[in-house]
Image (cartoon, grey):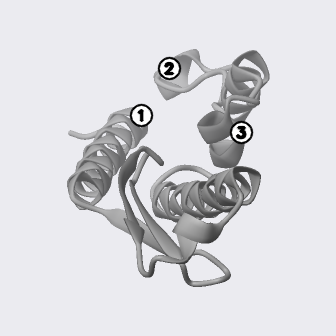
Amino acid sequence: MSTSWQDDLERAYTELEQSQEALRQVHTDLAGRTVTVKSKNRAVSVVVDAQGEVLDVKFHSRAYRSMPAAELSALLVETIGQARKQAMAELASMFSAVLPPAVPIAGMLNGTADIDEMMREIMRQVPSDLGTPPAERG
């Protein structure tokens, strides 16, 4: 005979397995994902991976040869920044589809998340008597 808390536990385990599979799929999808951004003057493009690491820089004309060093530098920094921002937005979007809404994905990706506060919020959402047989619940 199955009890309510056993059903709850089985349901939670099934949800955990589904979440793990969804996260594995995100990881697989990220493996070969790249983002390419072309500069505003179309002289250069930058390719980054899903984590924002620069994989390639391509110059589409010889215009860069006549650019002052500071202008070329600013163009590269801006284009790389845009590519990284786009990669992080895509990464956040993919994870937001499989993680609970309380998880501050953007903060985790950019290093500003308060992990302690995140864990407190998660724990507030877990019933204090989860897993306790109904006869023992007060």
CA distance for labels 1 and 2: 7 Å
> What amino acid type is highlighted by mark number 3?
Gly
Quarter of the view holding residue 82: bottom right
Tell me which numbered mark, 3 or 1, is placed earlier along the sequence: 1
Q: Secondary structure at mark 3?
A: helix
Label disc, if present, on residue 120 of the rendered structure? none
Mark 1 residue type: Trp
Quadrant showing the C terminus = top right
Q: Earlier in the sequence, mark 1 or mark 2?
A: 1
Which numbered dot is residue 5? 1
Image spot of residue 89 (x, y percent): 59, 62
Q: Is residue 61 above or below residue 57?
A: below
Residue at image x 63%, y 31%?
A: 126
Alpha-carbon neighbours of circle 2 within 10 Å: few (<14), some, or many (≥20)?
few
What's the residue type where badge 2 is placed?
Thr
**CB under 8 Å between callouts 3 and 2?**
no
Residue 90, x across and y down, in percent: 51, 65
- Residue drawn at point x = 41 percent, y = 41 percent: 8
Residue 102: x percent and y percent?
70, 45
State the image coordinates of residue 23 (x, y, percent, origin top left): 32, 48
Identify the residue at horizontal 38%, vertical 67% (top origin): 58
Identify residue for label 3: 107
- Is 22 above or below relative to 41? above
Q: For the residue labelled by badge 1, is the local secondary structure a helix, a strand or a loop?
A: helix
Q: Which mark is residue 132?
A: 2
Give the left or right position of residue 30, taking residue 5 as reference. left
Alpha carbon distance from label 3 to label 2: 34 Å
Horizontally, is 30 left or right of 80 in the view? Answer: left
Task: Tell me which residue sits at (73%, 55%) in the image.
Answer: 74
